[in-house]
Image (tube, coloured by chain):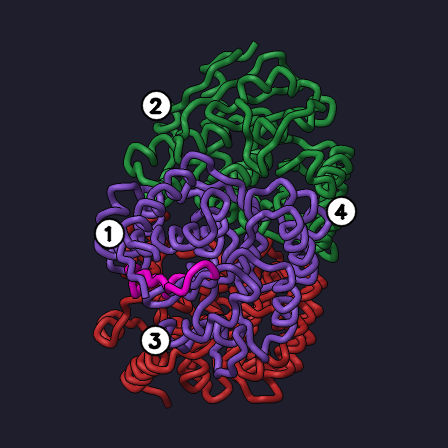
Chain colours: A green, B purple, C red
Amino acid sequence: MMQVNTLIDQVIFAWQQLQQKSPLVQCITNKVASNYSANVLLACGASPAMIDNPYEAESFTRITNALNINLGTPSSEQMQAMKISAATAHQKNIPWVLDPVGYSPILKWRSDMVDTLLTFLPSVIRGNASEILTLAGESIPSKGVDSTLDSKDVYPKATALLKYSPCIAISGASDFILSQETDQVIEIKGGSALQPKITATGCALGALIAAYCAVAPIHIATIAAHVHFAIAGKLAYESAPTLGQFNVAFIDELFTLNAEKIKQHIDIQIH
Amino acid sequence: MMQVNTLIDQVIFAWQQLQQKSPLVQCITNKVASNYSANVLLACGASPAMIDNPYEAESFTRITNALNINLGTPSSEQMQAMKISAATAHQKNIPWVLDPVGYSPILKWRSDMVDTLLTFLPSVIRGNASEILTLAGESIPSKGVDSTLDSKDVYPKATALLKYSPCIAISGASDFILSQETDQVIEIKGGSALQPKITATGCALGALIAAYCAVAPIHIATIAAHVHFAIAGKLAYESAPTLGQFNVAFIDELFTLNAEKIKQHIDIQIH
Amino acid sequence: MMQVNTLIDQVIFAWQQLQQKSPLVQCITNKVASNYSANVLLACGASPAMIDNPYEAESFTRITNALNINLGTPSSEQMQAMKISAATAHQKNIPWVLDPVGYSPILKWRSDMVDTLLTFLPSVIRGNASEILTLAGESIPSKGVDSTLDSKDVYPKATALLKYSPCIAISGASDFILSQETDQVIEIKGGSALQPKITATGCALGALIAAYCAVAPIHIATIAAHVHFAIAGKLAYESAPTLGQFNVAFIDELFTLNAEKIKQHIDIQIH
């Protein structure tokens, strides 16, 4: 059984490792998220590289410390790169995060690719409640790429996905993290209602999970990335409650997180 | 004959509908604009989805509430998606906005595609003075994708475009909006001289017009989107007159617009 | 022999010309940099156009005032456009800047294209220390697209590249600029430690060098662009020492540079 106190120490240690090692994170991500994800990774201490063509995918993934694959706005060349990079990561034991943006019967092209990518056993699958539930085989109404469901209603059904990946993360007002290692479900609170009003925050979180996976065990890494976001979102909102200012303050807070702030503001519950 | 007072009430009602319905807006847009357009849509109350591949274009456009097509930096796959999505929107009576960025003899590939897209009768054509005038069949010198002309000199010639679309919008220091329904031309003042110093503001305006078209009659929707931008630009400049700060304040003002601010700051003239 | 005082006058004159002429700059650049580079160009006084498809590359490059080619995240269509645009610029004597992002044996596809592009004799080659050293034929360990080397250790070896281009610029804590015209090496200090924590600043600098090349001799243009960035970075950090705020202030400072600020803050050394 995990204890909250142990968990906090592990999150702090993961954050320290991220600062010290500054891992190289390859992101094959969507047009909307590419600049933002790179800036979030830099702010948090990692080193981004957005190499997303099939001709360099294998050789580059072999030297990367972690990989993030996001299906937001794929091109055919990106799709080929995803398959090659996921296969390479799987073969070389490089941690990789799958973000199945828009997974649904309506978006068949990407959903078929997600099904293929699952065979390369992602280290973490992260998504919003709608995507995770659909991926877990439930049939639900979807609204574009944003979720219409509550993550706390979804997590019991997400266990079905643990056959593809050791760790499942569902983001929402609260985030829920499931793991093959334990029956416990971790709930992370914090953040701000303004976060979903900034595009690509979920995508950038996927990239940050990958970064943490390069320096910590997968389950801890996933929790640490969500805590990093939740605290930064909460503190940013306290100092800047309007949307434009919030986005600036959010980057400030991602950048200035430290052990003291983690201890003081972490809000984790074990179910 | 439209009256300014009636128009103001309709703009306020359209804004309220946008907040309440948060319509799903598909954007097939350029690399420069994708993140910014999504953030502008979110700030204004809509729900963006940047699905731009030909394999999912038809099934996605069928469920979207509005569509924005922008020719800024097309790839071949985006071009195919544009044609499919425009055809689908036309067939399903889904409102769609055409932004013929760079329309000119020098940029033939996109200009030919714009000509094809016109056959699917866009709900609104919006552009700067150079693009609209060239599209209306005039021959003018162009400077890249930015206009060298004044919108007030152009609007009388833009009536030629009303055979393709019920509503034509020309952005500039003042914006001018033409409609099939009336001989009146609406002029909208406001904004800030800093707005054209931020890339993709025109592109994001096109996305916002689409969002309003999902919740209001096309002519009112187009006016409302321009008013939303004009007031936000004016108020942002008052609180933040330097370029970087202005961009942050602009998002703040797009987000915090309300009926009171519309009443107080709207600056419309009917010609 | 160049004198620092003469150089300062030339940099000021170049900046004035940039404001007055607002040259059109075509950028074929990466996904991460496209929005940021366009905003930097606008803030500095230039007029950006991100035309990057092979079907319009030739006709557009013929009318552009300068061209920036950046290999960050190429697609096949962008690669074709790069070749056509570089050839056109070479043939028409239009200044063009090559930014060989990620040049290394691991990223063979782009590195082969860079080798091809060199045959069209770029006006300026700019990169970080790792890229420039590898391009100069040295074998070094690389970490993704970020440099692991110090620019001051690299510049003596970069002279090998002067056979491809009249001007070589190496960015880092200090920037170093080499020229065919002189044995003197120009060192530019300033900037801020936060600059490399914002993605695509180097890419945007490449675009700005191109802009200056449209209005000033190549060597002066390259120096002026680096000075523009160095002063803006330094002043931004003085007013906003946290990452999110810094990025906003940086755009402010790029926009509000003037002759007085250049005189007061320029920090150039001639070696």
Tag 4 near tag 1, CB within 8 Å: no
Image coords of residue C242 (percent x, y): 32, 47
- Amino acid type, residue under disc 2 in the picture: Gln
> Residues under labels 3 and 2: Cα distance?
47 Å
Label 2, secondary structure: give it.
helix
Which chain does tag 2 point to?
Answer: A
**Which residue, given by chain and number where applicable, does mark 1 sit on?**
B265
Residue ID at (44%, 44%): A43
Which residues make up the magenta segment?
Answer: B180-198
Image coords of residue B31 (percent x, y): 55, 58
> Residues under labels 4 and 1: Cα distance?
54 Å
**Labels 3, 2: one chain:** no
**Which residue, given by chain and number where applicable, does mark 2 sit on?**
A264
**Labels 3, 1: one chain:** no
- Amino acid type, residue under disc 1 in the picture: His
Q: Residues within 10 Å of mark 3 (few under 14, many from 20)?
A: some
> Residues under labels 4 and 2: Cα distance?
42 Å
- Near-viewer residue (B259 or B203): B259
> Residues under labels 1 and 2: Cα distance?
44 Å
Tag 3 near tag 2, CB within 8 Å: no
**Which residue, given by chain and number where applicable, does mark 3 sit on?**
C269
Q: Quadrant of residue A131?
A: top right
Residue ID at (69%, 66%): C77
Tell me if residue B122 comes above or below residue A107 in the rendering: below
* Quadrant for the N terminus of chain A in the image: top right
- Amino acid type, residue under disc 3 in the picture: Gln
**Which residue, given by chain and number where applicable, does mark 4 sit on?**
A84
Q: Residues within 10 Å of mark 2 (few under 14, many from 20)?
A: few
- Near-viewer residue (C140 or B259): B259
State yes or no: residue A181 in magenta. no
Mark 3 or 1, which is nearer the eye?
1
